[in-house]
Amino acid sequence: MLESVGRLVGENRRPLLELFLGVLVPLCLFALLAREVVHQAPPPWDVTVLTWIHAHASPAADRVMIFASEIGTEYGLVPFSILFALWLLRRRDAAGFGFFTLSMLGTWALNVATKQLFGRERPALWPSPAPEQSFSFPSGHAMGSMSLAAALGVLAWRTPYRWPVVAGGAAFTLLVSGSRLYLGVHYPTDVLGAWLASLAWVLGVRQILLARAHR
């Protein structure tokens, strides 16, 4: 019996490790952040980070960060995601299309649900040059950019473009997410929670739809 269990674990060591590091660990860290978010007052370091960022604000930086925020939604991420999904369809890559589409649409649905669940008010430390009205946790921009970067990284992982895609995705995620902090419409915990939730979701979808094909 023990030998059978050991053999089963040995044969599935890699997928179990991927499940643990890619899904369970991010979910546990998200739960720890969520414990902080349910309190009315934000953690002290949330305010400290935002205050430090705002100390470096300028009219020129405002314009750059507003643009960065916009390409994280309807002016960049959304049209790119639609075009990329259509490209996958044209290549008749049904598995890739299903994975990418479910990753992005699932992220959007997850963000809407968690915002309503936690109902966290947005920061009001200074008048934002691009104010928002919806709830704050987790950041939709950060979730969308991280999901796009993670999904593209998964699809490119077995190609020669792996590292350029990973580096580009990381830069895009940091730019979009950082713009939300600069604009004062999200706390750092909103962004961290968004990254963790997106990673868990995208890598979880990968385990369901692509892991067997990749192995």
Image (spheres, grey):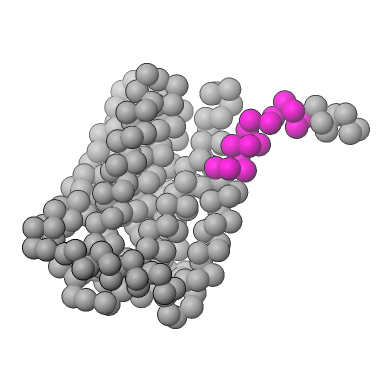
Q: Is residue 111 visible?
A: no
The dominant secondary structure in magenta is helix
* Residue at left offset 55%, top offset 42%: 22
Q: Quadrant of residue 20?
A: top right
- The picture places residue 130, in percent across and down from the top left corner, at 17, 66
Residue located at (32% from left, 28% from top): 164
Magenta span of residues: 8-22
Q: Quadrant of residue 27?
A: bottom right
Is 38 rendered above or below residue 17?
A: below
Of residues 112 and 15, the one nearer the viewer is 15
Q: Within the magenta stretch, is there residue 39?
A: no
Image quarter of the C terminus = top right
The location of residue 189, given as percent across then percent down, is 41, 64
Residue 8 seen from this side: yes
Q: What residue is shown at x 45% (from left), y 35% (from top)?
A: 99
Q: Residue furthest left?
A: 59
- Furthest residue in direction right, as rendered: 1
Eyeballing the image, is 100 above or below 178?
Answer: above
108 shown above or below 119: above
Percent across and percent down for residue 123 are 31, 74
